[in-house]
Amino acid sequence: MSSDDQTRSRKRLSRDERRRQLLDVAWQLVREEGTDALSLGRLAEQAGVTKPVVYDHFETRTGLLVVLYQQYDARQTRMLEQALVRCDASLASRAGVISEAYVDCVMSQGREIPGVSAALAGSPEMEALKRAYEQPFLDKCREALVGFSPSGNIGLAGMRLMVGAADALSQAAAAGELDAGQAKAELQAAIVAMVERQ
């Protein structure tokens, strides 16, 4: 087959398809080699495209890392929303669903998301991302739990406690320090206790 025939037989990807392909390859690189190995040049090489194609989609390594974090957050939000719709209207059930969705999402990303977060740590982009994505998550959790609070309210300190415990327990499970079931049970208990103290 001539190179012209090969070129014609190779399907040209749309912009959205190319972006999805590049993100899939980026996640694979992070999973297999760690975040330090992820550069736009390395991504181009692994994806079989030229560097300008990758730069056209992400501009900078930080821009790529931001998009990876956004994908992770969208997955976490989707998992939580789907689980809350299906659960019983009890404090234990809702706390269990929040725990399960959080831990499962972190576990599904294995070592990738901590590496992405660490690579973005201290950057203005990461601080903006955290603010943009954390508040809707906190609002969803507060809405799911507030009806069980004796005071009818859940304060910011309680919500921060929940997120801190969720992060710590999920990362420990992803690192293999804790069994995922144990992390979920401890987080569920912490959420129930936090709501009942309000």
Image (cartoon, helix red, strand yellow):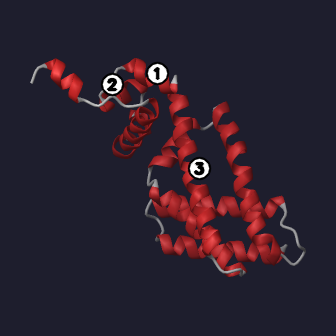
Q: Position of residue 61 (x, y in %)?
A: 50, 28
User: Which of the two residues, 143 or 29, is positioned nearer the viewer here?
Assistant: 143
User: Which of the two residues, 48 or 194, is positioned nearer the viewer here?
Assistant: 48
- Left or right? Give the position of 198 relative to 36: right
Q: Position of residue 23 (x, y in %)?
A: 43, 38
Residue at mark 2: 49
Nearer-N-terminus badge (3/1): 1
Identify which residue is drawn at 64% across, 70% down.
85
Please say if 168 is above or below 25: below
- Left or right? Give the position of 171 relative to 196: left
Q: Amino acid at mark 3?
A: Asp
Cα separation, mark 1 vs mark 2, equals 11 Å
Q: Position of residue 83 (x, y in %)?
A: 59, 69
Residue at mark 3: 73
Residue at mark 1: 55
Q: How many C-alpha atoms fall within 10 Å of the one at disc 3: few (<14), some, or many (≥20)?
A: many
Q: Position of residue 153 (x, y in %)?
A: 87, 68
Cα separation, mark 3 vs mark 2, equals 27 Å
User: Which of the two residues, 52 or 174, is positioned nearer the viewer here?
Assistant: 52
Nearer-N-terminus badge (1/2): 2
Residue furthest to the right in view is 151
Cα separation, mark 3 vs mark 1, equals 23 Å
Please say if 180 is above or below 73: below
